[in-house]
């Protein structure tokens, strides 16, 4: 009995150690949206959904693949993950039209229509995501009545791509100026890239919303970086 128990411990221990070495919030995640671009300069990516029973369990495919759009200029490492960048790999800055490579918690669903999704954020007149580093409201969603007319931001209530979407918990502030207003949103016909978000056709976007309802992580990476996270990703 004791020998069998020791054998189980030997098998589990390396997996536990590996999970602990994975970057957060990925290490503790049980649901994942994996966005994989061929290169840093790609404007499209493969989107897949995975889940697992526990942080040390293997990932299981639960949906996809689907093809989505990413930044008009491709990808760049987010400021929070800049230590992962290798020589020649870009690091994201405000206005670069690159999607941020890294790992982030997904947030609330949002959109123009009324919804019974828990925590749903309905986009109404005046709602703005501030991308102006001079504003204390940088990288937050607020209203024009709160910030006034001069602060630069995305007029979400007038942007058809925000008819359906998901917030991404993207770590950036006005000091680092590392990009703002990162979402998973609707892919519109004829578009070839985004300003830094991930865009999906509506059926696939709705499936992602369902998948992350109880909390999930989105990983945005170029294929050349996947091997740096062996044992962490599917």
Image (tube, grey):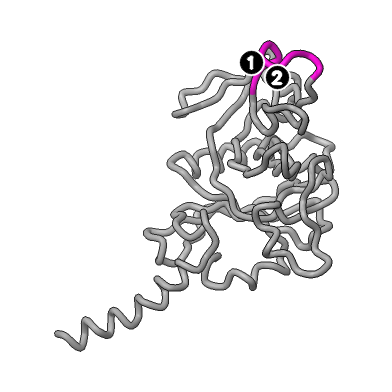
Image coords of residue 129 (percent x, y) = 70, 27
Residue 115's place in the image compared with 89, above or below, is above
At a point 50% along the width and 43% down the height, the residue shown is 212
Image coords of residue 103 (percent x, y) = 60, 54
Identify the residue position indicated by label 2 in the image: 157
At a point 67% along the width and 27% down the height, the residue shown is 137
Image coords of residue 211 (percent x, y) = 49, 44
Instruction: In this rendered view, identify the residue nearer to me: 76 or 108.
Output: 76
The number of numbered badges drawn on the structure is 2
* Residue 124, disc: 1
- Res 52 visible: yes
At a point 40% along the width and 71% down the height, the residue shown is 16
Q: Is residue 111 left or right of residue 196?
A: left
Residue 24's place in the image compared with 142, above or below, is below
Q: Is residue 176 left or right of residue 28?
A: right
Instruction: In this rendered view, identify the residue nearer to me: 185 or 137.
Output: 137
Distance between mark 2 and mark 1 Cα atoms: 6 Å
Is 224 in the magenta? no
Q: Quadrant of the C terminus?
A: bottom right
Question: Would you call the spot at circle 1 few (<14 residues within 10 Å), some (14-19), or many (20 or more)?
Answer: some
Residue 151's place in the image compared with 234, above or below, is above
Q: Quadrant of residue 9?
A: bottom left
Give the residue furthest to the bottom.
3
Start-end of magenta stretch: 142-150
Q: Earlier in the sequence, mark 2 or mark 1?
A: 1
Q: Is residue 12 left or right of residue 200?
A: left
């Amino acid at each position: 009995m004791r020998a069998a128990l020791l054998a189980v411990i030997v098998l589990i221990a390396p997996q536990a150690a590996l999970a602990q070495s994975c970057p957060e919030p990925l290490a503790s995640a049980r649901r994942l949206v994996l966005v994989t671009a061929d290169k840093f300069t790609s404007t499209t990516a493969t989107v897949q959904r995975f889940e697992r029973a526990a942080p040390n369990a293997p990932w299981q495919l639960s949906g996809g693949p689907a093809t989505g759009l990413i930044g008009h200029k491709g990808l760049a490492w987010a400021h929070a993950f800049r230590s992962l960048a290798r020589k020649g790999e870009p690091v994201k800055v405000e206005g670069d039209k690159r999607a941020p490579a890294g790992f982030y918690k997904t947030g609330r669903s949002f959109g123009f229509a009324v919804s019974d999704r828990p925590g749903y954020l309905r986009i109404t007149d005046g709602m703005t995501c501030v991308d102006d580093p001079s504003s204390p409201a940088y990288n937050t969603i607020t209203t024009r009545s709160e910030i006034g007319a001069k602060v630069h931001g995305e007029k979400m209530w007038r942007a058809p791509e925000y008819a359906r979407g998901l917030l991404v918990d993207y770590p950036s502030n006005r000091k680092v100026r590392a990009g703002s207003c990162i979402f998973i949103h609707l892919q519109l016909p004829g578009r070839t890239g985004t300003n830094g978000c991930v865009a999906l056709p509506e059926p696939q976007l709705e499936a992602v919303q369902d998948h992350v309802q109880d909390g999930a992580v989105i990983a945005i990476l170029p294929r050349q970086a996947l091997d740096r996270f062996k044992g962490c990703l599917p």
